Image (cartoon, rainbow, N blue to C red):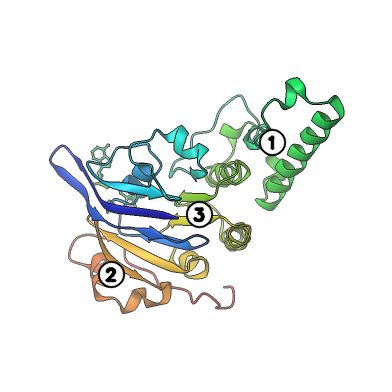
């Protein structure tokens, strides 16, 4: 589904990514991990076309998408969410999700009024179902920019899903989201996967990663140091060293077993 070949990125003299070879199969949920500043967001920016790599190529769905602009990549079904989402002031949460549902070309101009109404009703049903699932019904009619940071992350995720994503790149989807909703989010994302969506998830919450992901890849200072199952992360010396090493780093919390009883 997605394959990068020797992606590198430098900002001036700073080498942020080097020789990154990432392969993601159709229907997989892959965790993209690494300490702060290891290059995770930069890699997502490159995959989704928001940044150009300094070297290397990206293949998606059998075609070379290296250097395509973000809107073109989004049209191909690769959608991403941001570590810090920015929401419009003048749209409510419900409106934002409604506009995310794709309208068939020419719906408004050419289709019969009855059919157009049925399609609008269906879009509305899907938008409100998504609000419900993300526990945002209560804020449905509030401005999207006025809800909490965690809620904005969920709203952005809902919009990406409704927008018809086939490959979703999520940058820290649980930051600011309460623990109960995090567990529901695991279920929601697994259901999305059952519907045929492939996921790459950047996360620091190891409990979330352990429950959600099939496989994890770990970046340390721009280089891949591991590719393993979540429960194998703690056995990997390079991973433990990256998180607990001499440099001042965020300690690595224990990884939840994928089938562990919910905490
Ligand atoms: N536009 C930029 N110009 C210069 N340096 C940058 C730029 N964007 C990122 N960097 C640097 O690249 C490195 C990787 O940053 P990146 O945001 O990709 O890390 P990250 O793994 O997402 O970290 P975090 O877990 O804190 O989100 C950091 O050293 C960062 O300062
Ligand atoms: Mg980041």
Q: Secondary structure at mark 2?
A: helix
Residue with the mark numbered 1: 94
Q: Secondary structure at mark 3?
A: loop
Q: Residue at (46%, 65%) from the top-left corner? A: 209
Q: Nearer the viewer, residue 149 or 88?
A: 88
The total of numbered circles placed on residues is 3
CA gap between label 1 and label 3 equals: 21 Å
Q: Is residue 197 above or below residue 88?
A: below
Camera-nearest label, 2 or 3: 2
Q: Secondary structure at mark 1?
A: helix
Image location of residue 256, percent across then percent down:
48, 74
**Quadrant including the N terminus:** bottom left
Residue with the mark numbered 3: 174
Tell me, for residue 163, which label it has, or none: none
Q: Residue furthest right?
A: 114
Image location of residue 147, percent across then percent down:
59, 38
- Quadrant position of ligand 1: top left
Number of other residues with Cα within 10 Å of mark 2, as a class: few under 14, some 14 to 19, many 20 or more: many
Residue with the mark numbered 2: 239
Q: Nearer the viewer, residue 106 or 49?
A: 106
Q: Residue at (43%, 66%) from the top-left corner? A: 206
Image location of residue 13, percent across then percent down:
12, 40
Number of other residues with Cα within 10 Å of mark 1, as a class: few under 14, some 14 to 19, many 20 or more: many
Number of other residues with Cα within 10 Å of mark 3, as a class: few under 14, some 14 to 19, many 20 or more: many
Q: Residue at (45%, 39%) from the top-left corner? A: 73
Of mark 1 and mark 3, the one earlier in the sequence is 1
Image location of residue 4, percent across then percent down:
32, 53
Left or right? Give the position of 33 relative to 37. Answer: right
């Amino acid at each position: 589904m997605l394959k990068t070949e020797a992606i590198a990125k430098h900002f001036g003299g700073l080498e942020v990514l080097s020789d990154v070879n990432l392969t993601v199969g159709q229907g997989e949920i892959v965790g993209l991990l690494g300490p702060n500043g290891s290059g995770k967001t930069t890699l997502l920016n490159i995959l989704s076309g928001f940044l150009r790599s300094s070297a290397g190529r990206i293949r998606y769905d059998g075609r070379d998408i290296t250097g395509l602009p973000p809107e073109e990549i989004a049209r191909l079904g690769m959608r991403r969410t941001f570590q810090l989402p920015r929401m419009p002031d003048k749209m409510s949460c419900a409106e934002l999700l409604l506009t995310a549902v794709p309208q068939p070309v020419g719906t408004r101009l050419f289709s019969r009024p009855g059919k157009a109404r049925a399609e609008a009703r269906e879009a509305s049903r899907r938008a409100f179902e998504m609000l419900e699932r993300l526990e945002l019904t209560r804020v449905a009619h509030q401005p999207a920019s006025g809800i909490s940071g965690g809620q904005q992350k969920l709203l952005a995720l809902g919009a990406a899903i409704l927008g018809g994503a086939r490959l979703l790149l999520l940058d820290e989807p649980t930051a600011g989201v309460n623990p109960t909703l995090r567990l529901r989010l695991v279920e929601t994302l697994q259901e999305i996967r059952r519907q045929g969506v492939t996921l790459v998830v950047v996360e620091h919450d190891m409990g979330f990663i352990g429950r959600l992901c099939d496989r994890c890849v770990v970046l340390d200072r721009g280089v891949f140091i591991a590719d393993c199952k979540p429960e194998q992360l703690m056995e990997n010396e390079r991973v433990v060293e990256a998180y607990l090493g001499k440099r001042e780093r965020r300690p690595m919390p224990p990884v939840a077993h994928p089938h562990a009883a919910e905490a």
